[in-house]
Amino acid sequence: MDRPHWWSRNDGVETMAMPQRDDTIEAIKRLDALLEYAFMHGGEEEAARLREELRKLTDEV
């Protein structure tokens, strides 16, 4: 039996096991939820801070 590879083919697209990608996705989801909450509750300064943090995180991707 073959050992599993760190990559696989799925519908012609290669995918890699990338735990850092999963962590980044979770961080984006968390920041998005916090931003929505701040926006809904009038926290303009907090919303601006969260937008900047989200921008920095997505610029790294």
Image (spheres, rainbow, N blue to C red):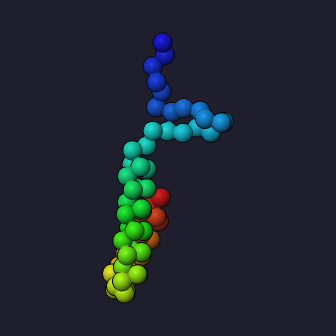
Residue 48, located in which quarter of the rendered image?
bottom left
- Please name the residue shown 46% across and 64% down the image: 58
- The image shows residue 20 at horizontal and vertical percentages of 39, 48
- Please name the residue shown 58% across and 37% down the image: 14
Q: In the figure, is residue 8 to the left or right of 55?
A: right
Q: Residue furthest top?
A: 1
Q: Is residue 6 above or below residue 46?
A: above
- The image shows residue 35 at horizontal and vertical percentages of 39, 74
Between 50 and 6, the residue placed more toward the observer is 50
Between 39 and 52, the residue placed more toward the observer is 39
- The image shows residue 33 at horizontal and vertical percentages of 40, 68
- Please name the residue shown 44% across and 71% down the image: 55
Between 55 and 45, the residue placed more toward the observer is 45
Q: Residue furthest right?
A: 12
Q: In the figure, is residue 5 to the left or right of 38?
A: right
Q: Residue furthest front?
A: 41
Query: Can I make out residue 34 in this image?
Result: yes
- Please name the residue shown 37% across and 76% down the image: 37
- The image shows residue 61 at horizontal and vertical percentages of 47, 58
Residue 54, located in which quarter of the rendered image?
bottom left
